Image (tube, helix red, strand yellow):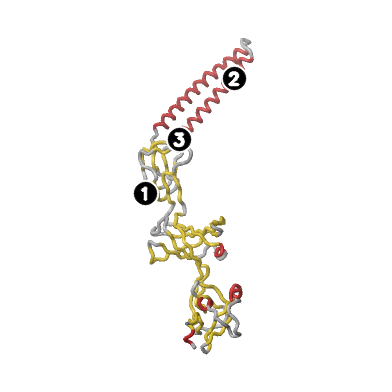
Amino acid sequence: SQEKYKTQVVDRGDIVQSISANGTLSPVVLVNVGTQVSGTLKRLNADFNSRVKEGQVLAELDPALFDAQLRQDQANVANAEANLVLMRAKEERARSLQQKGFISQDAVDQARQQLDSALAQIKLAQAQLTRSRTNLNYSVIRSPISGVIVARNIDVGQTVAASFQTPTLFQIAGDLKQMQIETSVAEADIGNLNIGLPVRFSVDAFADRQFAGKVKQVRLNPTVQQNVVTYNVVVAVDNPDEVLLPGMTAHVQIIVSRHENVLRVPNAALRFKPLKDESGEVAGKNNKKEKGRGGATVYRLDLGEPKPVKIKAGISDGSYTEVLGDELKPGESLVVREIG
């Protein structure tokens, strides 16, 4: 009798096949600003959340040591120039004396070698002057991009040492109006992904609001953890009102395909298998193989008894599966489980 079986009807509706994942929101451009030279921070011109322009001064190191080195190298250049004047005069005098036969050719060659050495000393002193001038410029830390400062890792009076690695003083996000979500997708789902697929996501801060994005990139480098292979999928997100902040956790649904007003059956009906089929054999042994080829069997309630109906299955959203053929009609009852 009908009381033996729990049923659901075949109906029409929308089916959205999607891939679920979690990810973290981050700025598209995030630059770490460091310093190439060591020193003590003398002035700080930017703080957390400051909006900065490209080239704007963020901080200044105490320039006293760099100024002293610059003056020393300027003095070295002046000394080398004075030495060059002397060596040039000596070389000219030696050539003049050699023409008159007062000194040997060897003495002229030595004078020319001393002149060449003085020219080289000038180039060396000028190179050292250029280096010290560059180091003085490096003591003023400027913003490489326009954006907003999301982190500041230094205070006035603090000494930064740029010996083995560059210390990070600031982190600057290029533009918070353009964000991205970096999420991981299992290898079984990666074949369904294409660039440009629509994405819906929510964040815990705005639980009642749905945000939209698009698949921007499927990174080729796999991540393998405990033999599970996943791929990084990057989702581009517009954030015009800047309510989405870096670091927020996003609950992502990537829309793989969407079919509207299609004939659909509940997934519970696909899982149902009666204890015995019409021939008395144990049912359901071959159901998985058929389902793998896009086919499946459901049981329609006919005069109080379940009758098998082979159907061709389309996409599924986890609750309902699309029916591609015309074996079923809307309103028919399908068995989902036995009662008692």
Query: Farthest residue toward the top?
Result: 102
| Cα separation between marks 1 and 2 | 61 Å
User: At 52% across and 26% down in the image, what residue appears?
Assistant: 122
- What's under tag 2, amino acid-wise? Arg
Q: Nearer the viewer, mark 1 or mark 2?
A: 1
Identify the element where label 1 is drawn.
loop
What residue is shown with label 2? 112
- What's under tag 3, amino acid-wise? Asn
What residue is shown with label 3? 135
- What's under tag 1, amino acid-wise? Phe
Above or below, 258 relative to 125: below
Alpha-carbon neighbours of circle 1 within 10 Å: few (<14), some, or many (≥20)? some
Identify the element where label 2 is drawn.
helix
Above or below, 203 relative to 285: above
Quadrant in the rendering for residue 219: bottom right
| Cα separation between marks 3 and 2 | 35 Å
User: At 52% across and 63% down in the image, what residue appears?
Assistant: 196
Query: What is the x, y in percent for residue 313?
Result: 56, 76
User: At 54% across and 62% down in the image, what residue appears?
Assistant: 186
Query: What is the x, y in percent for residue 321?
Result: 52, 75
What residue is shown with label 1? 48
Pointer 1 or 2: first along the chain: 1
Identify the element where label 3 is drawn.
helix
Query: What is the x, y in percent for residue 214?
Result: 49, 62
Apparent side of residue 325 relative to residue 31 in the rendered image (left or right) = right
Alpha-carbon neighbours of circle 3 within 10 Å: few (<14), some, or many (≥20)? some
Quadrant in the rendering for residue 27: bottom left
Query: What is the x, y in percent for residue 86?
Result: 52, 18
Alpha-carbon neighbours of circle 2 within 10 Å: few (<14), some, or many (≥20)? some
| Cα separation between marks 3 and 1 | 27 Å
